[in-house]
Image (tube, helix red, strand yellow):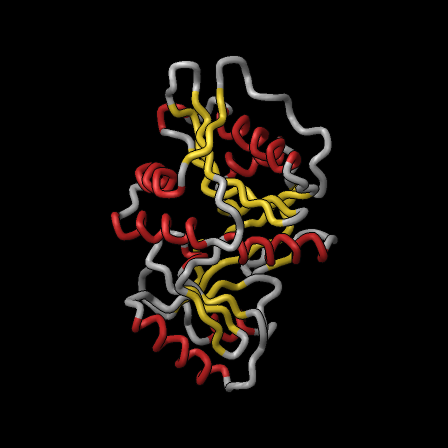
């Protein structure tokens, strides 16, 4: 498959709605616009909260625009990162950055479910889904990710400041042991699944799939009719589980940076 950001579905409208919903759901408090580019300056671990999203071509020459962004990232103490999608403007930005020698990394696929009919069965007996407050959820996910204290705090701030109502959940067994956790972000008809994690000792037992099915059912009860999620392009086991849940890849994105290491 091409290394370029690519649209992998014929449903452009659904892919674009998923992209817009994803931008809203991942918005940190530290963001600004520069010539039509959305720059995010959160010190959190998630790259989508500390990168450039080039939404419009802008009127400045590209090098001038990149220089302005570089100053903002330097002031925030962050490396300059650009997220490249099929919707990026200008359309040749990815090729231009590649020609400049900017490294490509962390390819991810956005998967969509075009409808929320025929969802999998309800939770197994003895398992329960519970809502967790944002700071507690950030701490839980941070521990599973092995995030730093600064990254955990930034994650909590982003959840609390999000324009999309925060809904982080845990899935537990009858003894209260954590089986999986995940966040639901509902905005109108679109429901996003984020930060789905399973403790190492519980992996490979289908708990993440059960959790996601329960979250989709909850999203449907809140009026959602479609869903999306983001997953690493090389995470075959997760992609297999999401396909089992009715998701299909809509488009691929990746990041580029002039920094030697991120």
Q: In this figure, what is the number of numbered marks?
A: 0
Which residue is at a point 53% across and 13% down the rendered structure image?
A: 125
Which residue is at a point 32% across and 40% down the rendered structure image?
A: 139
Q: Is residue 15 left or right of residue 85?
A: right
Q: Position of residue 14 (x, y in %)?
A: 70, 52
Q: Is residue 152 left or right of residue 186?
A: left
**Looking at the image, is 218 positioned above or below residue 179?**
below
Which residue is at a point 30% across and 38% down the rendered structure image?
A: 143
Which residue is at a point 61% across and 62% down the rendered structure image?
A: 86
Q: Position of residue 3 (x, y in %)?
A: 54, 59
Q: Position of residue 215 (x, y in %)?
A: 56, 33
**Looking at the image, is 42 positioned above or below residue 133?**
below
**Looking at the image, is 146 positioned above or below residue 125?**
below
Q: Quadrant of the C terminus?
A: bottom left
Q: Position of residue 159 (x, y in %)?
A: 43, 49
Residue nearer the viewer, 95 or 85: 85
Q: Quadrant of residue 47?
A: bottom left
């Amino acid at each position: 498959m091409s290394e370029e950001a690519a649209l992998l579905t014929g449903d452009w409208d659904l892919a674009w709605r998923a992209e817009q919903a994803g931008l809203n759901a991942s918005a940190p408090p530290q963001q600004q616009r520069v010539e039509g580019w959305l720059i995010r300056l959160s010190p959190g671990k998630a790259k989508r909260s500390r990168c450039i999203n080039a939404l419009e071509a802008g009127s400045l020459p590209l090098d001038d625009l990149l220089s302005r962004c570089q100053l903002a990232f330097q002031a925030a103490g962050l490396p300059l990162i650009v997220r490249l999608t099929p919707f990026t403007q200008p359309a040749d930005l990815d090729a231009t950055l590649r020609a400049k020698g900017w490294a490509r990394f962390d390819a991810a696929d956005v998967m969509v479910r075009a409808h929320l009919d025929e969802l999998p069965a309800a939770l197994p007996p003895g398992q329960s889904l519970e809502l967790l407050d944002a700071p507690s959820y950030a701490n839980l996910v941070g521990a599973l990710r092995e995030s730093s204290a600064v990254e955990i705090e930034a994650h909590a701030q982003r959840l609390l400041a999000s324009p999309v109502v925060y809904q982080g959940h845990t899935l537990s067994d009858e003894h209260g042991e954590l089986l999986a956790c995940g966040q639901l972000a509902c905005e109108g008809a679109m429901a996003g699944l984020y930060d789905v994690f399973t403790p190492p000792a519980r992996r490979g037992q289908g708990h993440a799939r059960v959790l996601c099915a329960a979250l989709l059912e909850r999203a449907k009860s809140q009026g959602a009719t479609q869903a999306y999620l983001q997953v690493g392009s090389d995470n075959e086991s997760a992609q297999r589980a999401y396909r089992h849940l009715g998701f299909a890849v809509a488009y691929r994105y990746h990041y580029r940076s002039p920094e030697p290491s991120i």
